[in-house]
Image (cartoon, coloured by chain):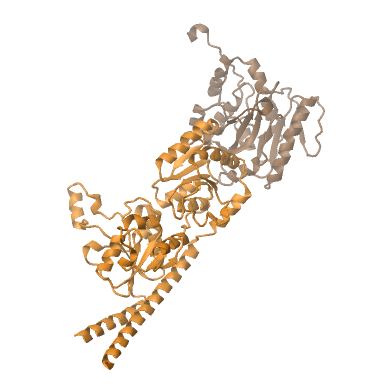
Chain colours: A brown, B orange
C-alpha cells in the first residue's frame, strides 16, 4: 500500500456541489500530511459534456464518464478502469476523511497484507452535524466474528448495513469480482461485500474513525433512494443481493413485490 | 569439653566462610503454594530465586505442607481413581509462571530433612511471621532476610505485642522505598535494602496493531460490573467496544491479552507497586487507573501524579473517561504527553537492571555475611585469649 487513488464521483457540477467537493478535497489534503507511505491521488469522475471544474491548491485527475450512466455505482466502476494504483478509496463529495485515516489504515495493512478491503469506522452525521452514529463498527464487537474486526459471510448474514465509502479497496480484487452492480439499488454495497466474501477476499474494519459520512443531504443518493424506494421494498433489495452475489456480472434482475394475499 | 566445642564451632564458621567464598552454599526462599493463582508477590520471590540461580548460586524453594502426599500415595490414589485432598499437594507455579520457575529445586520443610549451615541464606516473605518465629526459636544458623513487599501483611500476620526483634529479624529487603520507610518507622533497628521489582520482558509492545478491546484488571468483581454496566448504559453508541476481565490468567497469556487490547482499566486500592498497570503500559496499553492508597513511585512524586496514565479516584467517573480515551484512540489522538511519559516509565524496571541489582545484592549480602562470621571468629579468639590471660 503506497499511492492510493481517491475516487470522487460527481454527477452535478452546480456551485453547491463544487463547494462541498472542495471540503472533501481539503480532507484528502489533510490526510496526505499524515500519510508518509505514498501519494493520495484524487480522481474526480464527471459526466460527459460537463466542463472540468477547477480546485485550487490540489492536483486532481479527471475522468470523463462516457457511458451515459451517472449513478453512483456506474461512476465508480468507470473510474476504477483508470486507476493505476494498487488500492483505491471512494469519497462521496459531501463527505470527508478523518485526517489520519490512511496513516491509521496503513498501520493495520502492515500485518494484514492479504486483506483486500480495509473499512473505516464511519461516523455518520445528520444535516447540521447535531447527531451522529457509527457505522461498520459492529465488526469490532467480540461476538461478531471469531477474528475481531474481520467480516466474513457469517458476519454478513447478521449485518447488512456496512458501507464501503472511505474503505481502501484493492483495485485488482474489485475488478476481478465484477465491480459494483448498479442494478442493485440500496443494497449495492452489501451485494459487493457478499461477492468479496464469496471470492475469498478478506475484509476488515480498522478500529479507527476514518470517514465522516453525511447522512440525509438533499439530493444525495440515500435521499433519492429514501424518496424513491418505499420502506416495504428495502428488504427485498437485500434479498435480491443475497440471490445475485454468486454472479460476477450484473444480471439486471429486479425485485419482485409479493402479492398481498401471499403476505397474508 | 567447652574448649573442644569452641574449636568445633570455629571450625564450622571457618568452613562457612570458605563455602561462601566458593559459592558453595544455598539461598533458601520460603514460598506459599499459589495453587495456580497468579500472584505478583510470589512472582517477585520466584524471580529473585531464578536470578540468583542464573548467577551461579544454589537455590532452593521451601514450602510447608504437613502430611504431603508421597509419590507412592498419589499413584495409588490415581490407580483407584480415589479422591485427592488438594491441600496435601504442592501445586507450584508451573502453569502460571512457567516451567523455568517450577523447575527450581523445591523442598517441603515439614519432611524434617531440611538442614542449614551458617553459610546459607533464608529469605522469608513478610507474611510468614510463624516461620520467622520458628527459625528463631530453633536457632537455625543461617542468615535470615525478610522480603517486604506489602506492609499490610506484616500487620495482618504478626500477633499483638510481638515485633520482629522478638524473632531476631534485623535485615529486610523491601520492594519499594515506601515499604522500607514504613517498616523503619515501626522497627527502627532493622537494616533495609531496596530491590525494585522487575517487569518480565514478555510484557512488550505487540507486533500486530491493537484491537479495540478494554482490558479490566480489578481485584473486585463488583468494580468490573460497576464500570462495565455503567459504560454501556451511558454510552450505547460504544456498545460495540469489548471488555475483557483479566483475572487469574497465566502470566504469558496475561501478557498476550494485554498486547491485544488497547486500553487497560486498573483498579487496585491496596497495591504497593502496581505491577499490572506497569505490565499493561509495557504492552502499549493506555492505562486508566484508580489512584491507590499508597501511590507507587512510578506513578507520581512530591510534585503530583505523572502523565503516564489517566488517573481517577472515583470508579463512577470511569465510563466518561473511558469514552473519551476510546474516542481519542480511535482517532490516533492520544496526547503526546501521555505517550512520552509512558515511554519514560517503560524504561524502568527492566530485566537487565533487575539482574544487575540482584547480582549486587547477592554480592553485598554474602560479603557482609563473611564479615560477620569473621568478626564472630575474632571475638571467640579474643574471648579465649582473655580467659587464658585470666
- Determine the residue located farthest toward the top in the rendered image: A261
Give the percent coordinates (x, y) of residue B354. Answer: 47, 64
A222 vs B249, left or right, is right
State the image coordinates of residue A3 (x, y, percent, origin top left).
Answer: 69, 43
Is B73 left or right of B323, judged from the image as shown? left
Q: Residue at x 31, y 62 (%)?
A: B162
Residue B78: % across, % down: 20, 50
As rendered, which of A229 and A27 lies closer to the eye? Answer: A27
Vertical side of A101 occupied by A186: above or below: above
In the image, A129: left or right of B230? Answer: right
The residue drawn where x is 43% and y is 50% is B270
Q: Where, by quadrant of the figure, is residue B182 drawn?
A: bottom left
The residue sitting at 80% across, 39% down in the picture is A57
Q: Quadrant of residue A18?
A: top right
Looking at the image, the residue that sits furthest to the front is B161
Work out whether residue A150 or residue B239 is closer to the camera in this orientation and state it: B239
Labels in figure, total: 0
| Horizontal side of residue B170 vs B243, given as left or right | left
Q: Residue B305 appears at what percent x and percent y?
A: 56, 52
Q: Is residue B261 visible?
A: no
Q: Where A123 falls versus A238 (above or below)?
A: below
Amino acid at each position: 500500500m503506497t499511492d492510493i487513488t481517491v475516487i470522487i464521483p460527481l454527477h452535478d457540477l452546480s456551485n453547491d456541489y463544487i463547494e462541498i467537493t472542495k471540503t472533501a478535497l481539503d480532507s484528502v489534503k489533510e490526510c496526505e500530511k499524515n500519510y508518509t507511505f505514498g501519494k493520495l491521488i484524487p480522481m474526480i469522475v464527471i459526466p460527459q459534456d460537463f466542463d472540468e471544474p477547477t480546485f485550487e491548491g490540489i492536483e486532481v485527475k479527471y475522468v470523463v464518464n462516457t457511458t451515459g450512466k451517472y449513478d453512483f455505482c456506474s461512476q465508480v466502476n468507470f473510474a476504477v478502469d483508470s486507476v493505476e494504483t494498487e488500492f483505491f478509496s471512494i469519497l462521496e463529495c459531501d463527505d470527508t476523511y478523518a485526517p489520519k485515516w490512511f496513516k491509521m489504515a496503513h498501520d493495520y495493512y502492515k500485518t494484514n497484507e492479504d486483506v483486500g478491503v480495509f473499512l473505516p469506522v464511519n461516523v455518520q452525521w445528520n444535516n447540521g452535524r447535531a447527531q451522529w452514529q457509527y457505522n461498520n463498527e459492529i465488526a469490532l464487537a467480540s461476538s461478531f466474528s471469531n477474528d475481531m474486526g474481520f467480516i466474513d459471510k457469517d458476519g454478513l448474514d447478521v449485518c447488512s448495513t456496512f458501507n464501503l465509502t472511505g474503505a481502501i479497496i484493492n483495485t485488482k480484487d474489485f475488478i476481478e469480482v465484477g465491480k459494483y452492480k448498479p442494478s442493485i439499488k440500496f443494497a449495492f454495497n452489501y451485494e459487493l461485500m457478499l461477492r468479496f466474501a464469496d471470492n475469498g477476499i478478506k475484509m476488515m474494519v480498522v478500529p479507527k474513525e476514518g470517514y465522516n459520512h453525511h447522512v440525509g443531504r438533499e439530493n444525495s443518493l440515500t435521499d433519492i433512494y429514501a424518496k424513491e424506494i418505499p420502506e416495504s421494498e428495502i428488504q427485498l433489495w437485500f434479498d435480491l443481493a443475497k440471490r445475485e452475489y454468486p454472479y460476477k456480472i450484473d444480471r439486471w434482475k429486479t425485485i419482485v413485490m409479493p402479492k398481498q394475499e401471499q403476505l397474508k | 569439653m567447652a574448649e573442644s566445642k569452641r574449636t568445633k564451632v570455629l571450625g564450622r564458621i571457618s568452613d562457612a566462610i570458605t563455602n561462601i567464598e566458593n559459592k558453595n552454599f544455598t539461598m533458601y526462599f520460603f514460598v506459599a503454594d499459589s495453587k495456580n493463582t497468579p500472584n505478583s508477590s510470589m512472582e517477585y520471590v520466584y524471580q529473585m530465586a531464578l536470578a540468583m540461580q542464573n548467577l551461579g548460586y544454589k537455590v532452593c524453594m521451601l514450602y510447608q505442607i504437613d502430611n504431603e502426599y508421597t509419590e507412592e500415595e498419589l499413584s495409588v490414589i490415581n490407580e483407584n481413581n480415589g479422591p485427592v485432598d488438594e491441600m496435601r499437594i504442592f501445586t507450584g507455579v508451573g502453569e502460571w509462571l512457567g516451567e523455568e520457575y517450577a523447575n527450581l529445586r523445591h523442598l517441603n520443610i515439614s519432611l524434617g530433612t531440611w538442614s542449614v549451615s551458617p553459610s546459607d541464606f533464608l529469605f522469608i516473605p513478610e507474611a510468614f511471621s510463624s516461620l520467622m518465629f520458628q527459625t528463631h526459636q530453633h536457632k537455625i544458623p543461617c542468615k535470615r532476610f525478610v522480603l517486604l513487599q506489602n506492609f499490610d501483611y506484616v500487620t495482618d500476620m504478626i500477633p499483638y505485642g510481638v515485633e520482629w526483634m522478638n524473632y531476631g529479624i534485623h535485615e529486610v529487603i523491601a520492594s519499594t522505598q515506601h515499604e522500607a520507610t514504613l517498616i523503619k518507622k515501626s522497627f527502627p533497628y532493622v537494616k533495609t535494602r531496596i530491590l525494585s521489582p522487575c517487569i518480565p520482558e514478555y510484557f512488550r509492545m505487540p507486533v500486530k496493531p491493537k484491537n479495540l478491546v478494554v482490558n479490566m484488571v480489578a481485584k473486585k468483581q463488583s468494580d468490573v460490573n460497576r464500570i462495565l454496566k455503567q459504560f454501556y448504559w451511558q454510552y450505547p453508541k460504544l456498545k460495540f467496544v469489548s471488555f475483557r476481565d483479566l483475572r487469574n490468567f497465566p502470566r504469558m497469556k496475561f501478557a498476550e491479552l494485554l498486547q491485544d487490547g488497547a486500553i487497560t482499566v486498573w483498579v487496585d486500592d491496596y497495591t504497593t507497586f502496581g505491577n499490572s498497570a506497569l505490565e499493561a503500559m509495557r504492552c502499549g496499553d493506555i492505562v486508566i487507573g484508580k489512584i491507590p492508597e499508597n501511590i507507587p513511585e512510578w506513578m507520581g512524586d512530591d510534585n503530583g501524579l505523572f502523565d503516564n496514565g489517566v488517573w481517577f479516584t472515583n470508579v463512577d467517573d470511569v465510563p466518561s473517561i473511558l469514552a473519551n480515551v476510546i474516542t481519542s484512540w480511535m482517532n490516533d489522538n492520544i496526547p503526546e504527553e501521555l505517550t512520552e511519559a509512558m515511554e519514560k516509565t517503560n524504561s524502568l524496571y527492566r530485566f537487565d537492571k533487575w539482574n544487575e541489582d540482584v547480582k549486587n545484592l547477592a554480592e553485598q549480602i554474602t560479603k557482609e555475611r563473611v564479615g560477620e562470621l569473621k568478626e564472630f571468629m575474632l571475638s571467640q579468639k579474643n574471648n579465649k585469649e582473655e580467659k587464658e590471660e585470666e
